[in-house]
Amino acid sequence: MSEINPPLVSAVIVSYNRREDIRETLLMLCRQRYKNLEIIVVDNASADGTAAMINALGLPNLTLIQMEENVGVKAYNMGFKAARGQFILILDDDSFPAFDAVDKMIEKFDKYPAIGIISFTVKDYSTFTDTPAAPVSSAADHAFNDDYIMSFHGAGAGVRREVLERAGGYPEEFFLYFNETDMALRVWDAGFRIESFPEIVCFHKSSQVNRTSERGPYYYTRNIFWVIWKNYPGVAMWKATVLMLFYVFYYSMDQHTFLYIRALLDAVVNIRKIRRSPIKMQIAKRFRIHFKTPFTMYR
């Protein structure tokens, strides 16, 4: 990385009714060691004064895009389109990177051209200390794991612009949840890697604001079906579908709820919203999806 002309990094954040959380996120971004940083906030029609607060901050490197309604993860794609940077930093409105995280992210992208997305090590906000870390020397070469491959954490990730241009952004039909997995499958299929590094850290709040008990498992369940039907090739698609159907009916009886069945019906009724584009079989076989995740969230 050239210290004279460091590449522009665009931090893209979507906000929805978390005015104080995003205020802290923005102020923390301004304290990044890495300075060639633009910030793009897409506000998903917040009703708590978020947009007014952001405008009042008067940050010179910040662009605010205001949506007329809550469009879910489509708002991220709006931010990606507005971004001018060579690299995109994806954050939640209640997460922010450690003071040296963007510096380290750029170093890794320079060192490993095959990496398309860097998934930050996401730590709980309670572990944050308000003291910038001292510079550290580069770690030893990263060992790539080819036995299995993974997605990335949407609360903190760096993406090369060319990856978004080739693999596309988040699936807008998902609205919420599992959008990272869908995008990750396309990134791997396009020939890029997704890797994480323990020294590249962001902090995330475990907020329950606007997170109802049913929303998570509902969208997770529906969107897992859509991930399978969109991306998995032939036999792998049918095997994963049968497994998910078993989980839906087993946990519906076990937890005495119709939530998962409603999510399944939603997936079937609205199947035309997705566009099937199967990935390579070797990617599907190596990619790890935790199919039981939605069934552990609701009681």
Image (spheres, rainbow, N blue to C red):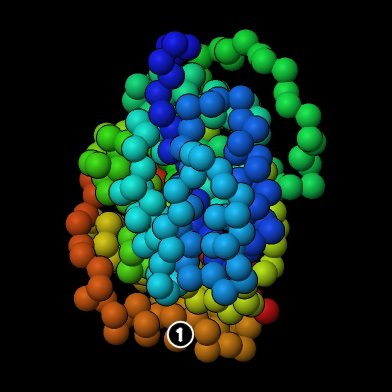
Q: Nearer the viewer, residue 106 or 138?
A: 106
Instruction: Name the residue: 41% across, 15% down.
Output: 5
159 relative to 47, above or below: above
User: SS of the residue at dot 1?
Assistant: helix
Report the residue marked by disc 1.
Answer: 261
Indicate left or right for 122 with 35 as reference. right
Residue 150's spot in the image, x, y percent?
A: 45, 43
283 relative to 3, above or below: below
Quadrant showing the N terminus:
top left
Q: Nearer the viewer, residue 73 or 145?
A: 73
Amino acid, disc 1? Ile
Q: Residues within 10 Å of mark 1 (few under 14, many from 20)?
A: some
Instruction: Name the residue: 72% across, 47% down.
Output: 124
Residue 232's spot in the image, x, y percent?
A: 28, 57
282 relative to 42, above or below: above
Instruction: Name the residue: 73% across, 26% down.
Output: 132
Q: Quadrant of residue 188 in the image? A: top left
Q: Is residue 202 visible?
A: no
Indicate left or right for 56 with 244 as reference. right
Q: Nearer the viewer, residue 254 or 16?
A: 16
Residue 182's spot in the image, x, y percent?
A: 36, 55
